[in-house]
């Protein structure tokens, strides 16, 4: 009998074999759920996302629902629970979808069927409460009044031979793509029986936010009569503008503002089960743009809306979910490197953690009373996402085993959370990931992995891009500092870096390095700094502000190098708020927060990585940083991807990314 295989450190190939779980949706009775599972192929250099059916009592194994097409997304159960709708581009009766279309499938089996050909495609949708149709969001030409005219214009536009992008809009691209020229996001109603499409916003001038194509910015009242949605009330749409909540009567066309206050930003409205009020997120941006999103209640009877949890020092993520009795809200909010699931009792205005995390990546709620089911997709530092179902009064039960066989043959090193004294003599959280078989009697190289944001945090989660176990697998101790500005540590901590970006964060990182160097297992000659996005900015900042020799080498992925040049980013309107200056009004203040202003002091070898399709931190930053180092005679290497955005998402490109990453550390080992 052959000996059992001993667990081995995780490899690049192992990371891409992990099946990634998302898009949780519970059936109305809570007995079944659907999720999306993404599988990657290194050989084909692609991925496939398919839908799986889960039993929330754990008595039946998961069953695959879809097989065709490359990507099935936004699965949602019909109100009666007899059908599941989803978006996909597939082939049906010999015709291939040119854009994402709506498909229906029975949870009991059978093939999915396309409802209708909808041009110019569907971005997001919600079921009507009676199950007769959906309301969907689409990029449309606002001057065209009929769906036939929209389809005709789309075909004409698709047949264009020229390729120039022409606009007068201030908000014209997002992350890695340009917004469709001349179009806006509006809501349409689709009748499933007839295929008839009715525009909801025709002639109103209304549009949804342009930077988020999910169903969360709009909802349908329980009686099916009204729509509630968020919009940017400004004449010129700009990323970062405050938003209002509007309600539209789908029968009469009458509209009213449920929440519209120049001092507040509102988003993600959700009707209560009885339809008498809505929950939404609200931030007091009149006080400062960094104010945190909190729950709010928006009555429909004309009375004033009210914020909830103003003294509760956490920022709430979307989505919000009501309990069936309307007495509570379920939500996630970061807390010191973790993201629990919370229950907000509305009568007492009390927040209670019901799933502590790790990190709750997604959740849903269905059922009533003792039959209520809470479904969570949760990961932690030592495992990728797992799905749990919790019934009233019972412990959570895991209901899938997608990645167990793979993880059983992997040896992951331990993780540890410590606290150091950072800037302003305040405690700063430091996460450590140790290599497998860590021996505290040996010397280990130390690697900072600096998170982006800055309004984000490292912590008890299993990353797929900068996976700390993979980065530690070759003997490094990985350190992640939640520097000032990180989220999950209260508003004052988050806000503290405004107008002096780089200053407090560097003090925190240096305090972390000091702590690391005091450990007997740390190799003081091999300390590295790596990071992406805002973490890449801090790596470049360190190169100009930390004496040469303290860090052996740097790796800067998609980092800001030149604050002025980064005005080309899709977030150009928001960054000056963080800097507390516009470059054309106070250039000195902007330069004081820009790494390139200290280029004359940069001496540490650096691997610079960037993608050409990165609109969040345009690649002029990486190219200028690399060119500057070469001009100064500093050892540098450039890894530039013509077909990647702010992240590296293609399996083969990710493989090359890690190989270059490890090779650079070895070169400077």
Image (spheres, rainbow, N blue to C red):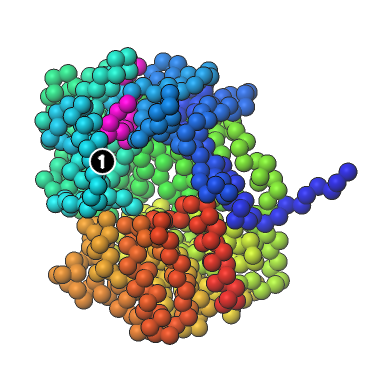
Does residue 41 lie above or below 655 as drawn? Answer: above
Which residue in the structure is indicated by mark 1? Answer: 159
In percent of width and height, residue 372 lies at: 47, 23
Q: Is residue 279 above or below residue 519?
A: above
Q: Position of residue 381 (x, y in %)?
A: 56, 51
Main secondary-structure element of the magenta-colored stretch: loop
Outermost residue to the front = 161
Residue in front for this viewpoint, 578 or 103: 103
Residue 590 shows in the view? yes
Q: Residue at x 40, y 79 (%)?
A: 629
524 lies above or below 203: below
User: Looking at the rendering, in which quadrant would you find the C terminus?
Assistant: bottom right
Left or right: 495 in relation to 30: left
Q: Which residues are magenta?
A: 117-133
Q: Is residue 59 left or right of residue 487?
A: right
Few, some or many residues within 10 Å of mark 1 (<14, 14–19, 20+): few
Residue positioned most to the right: 1
Q: Is residue 122 magenta?
A: yes
User: x, y (%) of residue 192?
Assistant: 32, 18
Using the rendered view, name the quadrant where residue 134 is placed. top left
Q: Say which element carries label 1.
A: loop
Q: Nearer the viewer, residue 29 or 533?
A: 533
Q: Position of residue 39 (x, y in %)?
A: 55, 41
Residue sitting at x 32%, y 26%: 117
User: 594 or 425: which is nearer to us?
Assistant: 594
């Amino acid at each position: 009998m052959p000996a059992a295989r001993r667990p081995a450190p995780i490899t690049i190939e192992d990371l891409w074999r992990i099946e990634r779980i998302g898009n949780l949706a519970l059936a109305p009775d809570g007995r079944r759920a659907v999720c999306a599972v993404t599988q990657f192929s290194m050989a084909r250099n692609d991925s496939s996302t398919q839908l799986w059916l889960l039993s929330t009592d754990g008595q039946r194994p998961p069953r695959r629902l879809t097989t065709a097409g490359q990507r099935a997304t936004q699965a949602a159960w019909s109100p009666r629970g007899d059908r599941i709708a989803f978006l996909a581009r597939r082939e049906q009766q010999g015709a291939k979808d040119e854009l994402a279309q709506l498909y229906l499938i029975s949870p009991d089996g059978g093939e999915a069927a396309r409802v209708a050909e909808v041009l110019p495609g569907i971005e997001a949708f919600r079921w009507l409460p009676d199950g007769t149709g959906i309301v969907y969001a689409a990029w449309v030409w606002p001057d065209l009044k009929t769906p036939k005219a929209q389809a005709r214009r789309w075909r004409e536009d698709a047949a264009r031979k020229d390729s120039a992008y022409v606009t007068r809009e201030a908000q014209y691209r997002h992350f890695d793509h340009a917004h469709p020229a001349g179009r806006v996001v509006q809501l349409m109603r689709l009748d499933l029986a007839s295929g008839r499409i009715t525009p909801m916003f025709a002639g109103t001038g209304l549009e949804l936010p342009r930077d988020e194509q999910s169903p969360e910015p709009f909802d349908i009242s329980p009686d099916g009569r009204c729509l509630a949605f968020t919009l940017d009330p400004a004449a010129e749409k700009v990323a970062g503008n405050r938003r209002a909540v509007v309600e539209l009567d789908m029968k009469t066309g009458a509209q009213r503002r449920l929440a519209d206050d120049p001092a507040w930003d509102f988003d993600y409205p959700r009707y209560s089960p009885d339809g008498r009020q809505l929950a939404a997120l609200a931030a007091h941006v009149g006080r400062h743009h960094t104010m945190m999103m909190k729950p709010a209640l928006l009555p429909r009877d004309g009375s004033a809306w009210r914020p909830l949890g103003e003294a509760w020092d956490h920022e709430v993520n979307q989505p919000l979910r009501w309990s069936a009795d309307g007495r509570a809200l379920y939500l996630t909010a970061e807390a010191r490197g973790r993201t629990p699931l919370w229950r907000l009792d509305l009568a007492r205005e009390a927040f209670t953690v019901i799933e502590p995390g790790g990190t709750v990546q997604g959740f849903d709620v269905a059922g009533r009373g003792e039959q209520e089911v809470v479904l969570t997709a949760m990961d932690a530092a030592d495992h990728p996402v797992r799905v749990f179902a919790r019934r009233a009064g019972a412990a959570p039960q895991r209901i899938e085993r997608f990645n167990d066989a793979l993880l059983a043959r992997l040896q992951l090193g331990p993780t540890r959370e410590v606290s150091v004294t950072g800037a302003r003599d305040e405690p700063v959280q430091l996460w450590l990931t140790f290599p497998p078989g860590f021996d505290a009697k040996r010397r280990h190289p130390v690697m900072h992995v600096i998170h982006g944001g800055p309004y984000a945090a490292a912590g008890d989660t299993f990353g797929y891009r900068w996976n700390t176990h993979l980065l530690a697998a070759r003997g490094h101790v990985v350190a992640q500092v939640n520097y000032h500005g990180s989220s999950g540590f209260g508003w004052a901590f988050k806000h503290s870096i405004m107008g002096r970006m780089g200053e407090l964060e560097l003090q925190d990182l240096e305090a972390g390095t000091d702590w690391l160097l005091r450990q007997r297992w740390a190799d003081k000659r091999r300390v590295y700094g790596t990071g992406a996005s805002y973490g890449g900015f801090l790596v470049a900042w360190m190169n100009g502000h930390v004496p040469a020799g303290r860090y052996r080498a740097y790796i800067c992925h998609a980092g800001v190098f030149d604050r002025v040049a980064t005005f080309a980013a899709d977030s150009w309107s928001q960054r000056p708020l963080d800097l507390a200056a516009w470059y054309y009004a106070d250039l000195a203040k902007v330069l004081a927060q820009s790494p390139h202003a200290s280029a004359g002091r940069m001496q540490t070898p650096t691997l610079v990585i960037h993608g050409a399709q990165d609109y969040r931190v345009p690649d002029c930053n990486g190219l200028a940083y690399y060119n500057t180092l070469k001009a100064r005679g500093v050892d540098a290497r450039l890894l530039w991807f013509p077909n990647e955005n702010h992240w590296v998402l293609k399996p083969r490109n990710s493989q090359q990314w890690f190989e270059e990453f490890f090779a650079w550390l070895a070169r400077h080992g």
